[in-house]
Amino acid sequence: MEPDLGFPFDRAPAAAFEPASFVDLLRRARPEVFPSPNPAVPTLAAGNAADVPHGTTILALRYEGGVVIAGDRRATEGYSIAHRTIEKVFPTDDSSAVAIAGAAGPAIEMVRIFQTELEHYEKIEGERLTLEGRANKLSQFLRANLPMAMQGMVVVPLFVGYDEVLGFGRIFKYDVTGGRYEESDYYATGSGGRDARGTIKKRFRPGMSRDEAVKIALEALFDASEEDVATGGPDMLRQIYPNIAAISAEGVVEIDDDAIGALFTDLLAERGATAGVEGRETVPGAAATRNPGTSPEEA
């Protein structure tokens, strides 16, 4: 039986039964799964946000014909490692992807609902949201998460995609309130974001190939892990490497661990050839200073 909407409606519009938004449909069918302002619902106690696993460094940069997105694999709880192999880069469809930083649980849940939302929209409307529309949709999710962010459960993603109309890759960053901003060439965020941006700034150049962009992303995450305790660098012993994906007109390509491992080996070889064999903490001439009057060989 159709609901009586009263004058001037003769019947309920189709949108009342088939909303294009999956979140709106879920809110109607199962409202209890959404956060409630009921004071009986427990909230995060002050100071407990550090006990929640947090993802750390993520980045994106453009190359000729597409965009690369990457993230390290470490999640932390305060100063402890909560997870060494967390996934932070997720394809959202065949022309876009999202990377997460911040509170890991809410971030992963947000990405899953976002993926379902895009799929639901495409099935109901018969067409895909534009890249701008997908970026705006993610902004709405972040705005809805603001009450949790005020309790310390901050989620800060990066959204990238290949714009089929404009013919190049695009990068969107966000703040905790849902504000959306587009970056022209590259961006990095998370606890090691500043260090990663420094590396990308030195290495980036317009018109790079995909392989060059992947190598720069790997180097930026490695440099961030050297300076930031919460960022996990490539781990050759455990065979743990960053998540890296490239998005272009051909779709989303996730770079496999074997390829990343080979690139990291090349990176270490290059740095060994240019930096010499002395450790970074070694002070040249320290041994001779410690033993005055002796030759370097005797020291």
Image: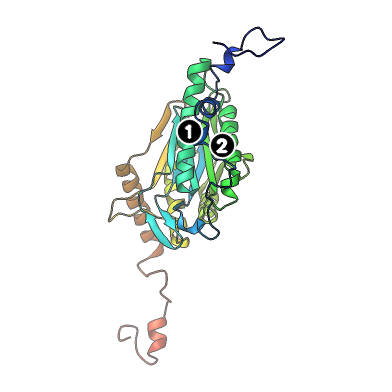
SS for tag 2?
helix
Spot the residue most to the right. Answer: 8
Q: Which amino acid does label 1 sit on?
A: Ile
Q: In this view, does 180 lie to the left or right of 267?
A: right
- In the figure, is residue 204 to the left or right of 225? right
Q: Indicate the quadrant containing the N terminus: top left, top right, bottom left or bottom right.
A: top right
| Coordinates of residue 143 in the picture (x, y in percent) | 61, 39
Most foreground residue, 184 or 17: 17
Q: Residues within 10 Å of mark 1 (few under 14, many from 20)?
A: some
Q: Report x, y in % for residue 265.
A: 32, 52
Residue toward you, 48 or 168: 48
Label annotation for residue 181: none
Residue 93 occupies quadrant: top left
Q: Name the residue under label 1.
A: 113
Q: Earlier in the sequence, mark 2 or mark 1?
A: 1
- Image colouring: rainbow
- The quarter holding residue 7 reads top right
Q: Which amino acid does label 2 sit on?
A: Phe
- Per the model, the C-alpha gap separating discs 2 and 1 is 9 Å
Residue in the image at 35% along x and 45% along y: 260
Residue 2: image location, x then y, percent: 57, 11
The location of residue 197, given as percent across then percent down, is 54, 51
Look at the numbered disc 1 and give the secondary structure of its residue: helix
Callout 2 crowding tier (Cα within 10 Å): few <14, some 14–19, many ≥20: some
- Whether pointer 2 and pointer 1 mark residues with C-beta atoms closer than 8 Å, the reply is yes
In the displayed structure image, the side of residue 16 where residue 118 appears, left or right = left
Residue under circle 2? 141
Figure quadrant of the C terminus? bottom left
Q: Which residue is drawn at 47% across and 62% down?
A: 227
